[in-house]
Amino acid sequence: MRWRRRHEVGDPLVCREFVELVTDYLDGALPEAERIRFEAHLAECDGCTGYLEDTRRLVGSLHEVSEPPADPATREALLRAFRDLRPGNDR
Amino acid sequence: MSVRRPSDMFRHAVDDDHGLLEHLRAGDEDAFQALVERHDASLRRVARTFVRTSTAADEVVQETWLAVVRGLSAFEGRSSLRTWIFSILVNRARTRAVRDSRSIPFSSLETDDSPTVEPAAFAADGRWISAPSRLDADPESGLLSAELREYLLDAVDELSPAQRAVITLRDLVGAPPAEVCELLGLTEVNQRVLLHRARARVRAALLPLMELSR
């Protein structure tokens, strides 16, 4: 993306770029040189450290979120199907 | 005496095929119920990427579960159980969309390349003007506060179809990137751009709540 490529190689990373690289970083998808710039910035910037930590919290919270179970009637129907169709239940 | 729902016993096992498959094949209803509870809502979210109405999505999800039940004995475990279930869903949802001739054009290309954080948050030199607002987390679990978590799913449901499908599979279901690319037919880069924008939007949707509570 255009605004990601504005820097020259070796320029220190700034916050504006950092926030756009967070997902790549968490996926381990940053090329080595970018990762080093990213981590160097992280070490000196509280704002960005908080931003990264928030992203981790967000992802963790989405994974743990519990949702109301599927409609009970539907669930009962599925359970019946499971009972009838399950392997070994040859009738 | 505390009432323990049968599905609690399998809550953790559902993310891990080992053992679960054996229970399912042995006809263990608690295991099946736990599997349904874990994935049903996510399946519906992903289905909505392809079909237009929630009724159609419900039907596709139900068909998927029936196909899972029927296919359990033949499932060879070459992919994870989760991938298998979601690939059945995606196939059925696509078929259904074609049949209804109402498919949503699944724009897998994220063309929006505007910044994900308000440019006004940064000074001319690209640094934060003031440190960004933090999301409230529970100090023990490190997860977002209960109040914020209530809003999370609403924010996910407001996303564009492609963003919603990617964040559902990656963050709610916990599928790895390669699996998501395969399921949705995305390139790795595109998958990551969609995820990045989805997470930034969900975060942005929660921020006004933070500022209110200040």
Image (tube, coloured by chain):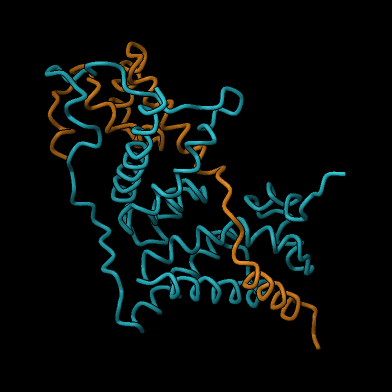
Chain colours: A orange, B cyan
Q: Position of residue B93 (x, y in %)?
A: 42, 73
Residue B133 falls in which quadrant of the image?
top left
Q: Is residue A91 above or below residue B138?
A: below
Percent of width and height locating residue B127: 21, 17
Query: Which residue is nearer to you in this view: B25 or A64?
Result: A64
**Residue at the image position 34 percent from the left and 33 percent from the top:** B208
Closer to the camera, B99 or A37?
B99
- Residue sitting farthest toward the top: A44
Quadrant location, the C terminus of chain A: bottom right
Q: Residue furthest bottom?
A: A91
> Is the residue A6 above or below the residue B90 in the image?
above
In this image, A39 relative to B145: left or right?
A: left
The image quadrant of residue A77 is bottom right
Looking at the image, is B141 positioned above or below residue B47?
A: above
Q: Position of residue B7 (x, y in %)?
A: 73, 55
Q: Is residue B70 left or right of residue B190?
A: right
Residue sitting at x 69%, y 72%: A76
Name the image quarter holding the N terminus of chain A.
top left
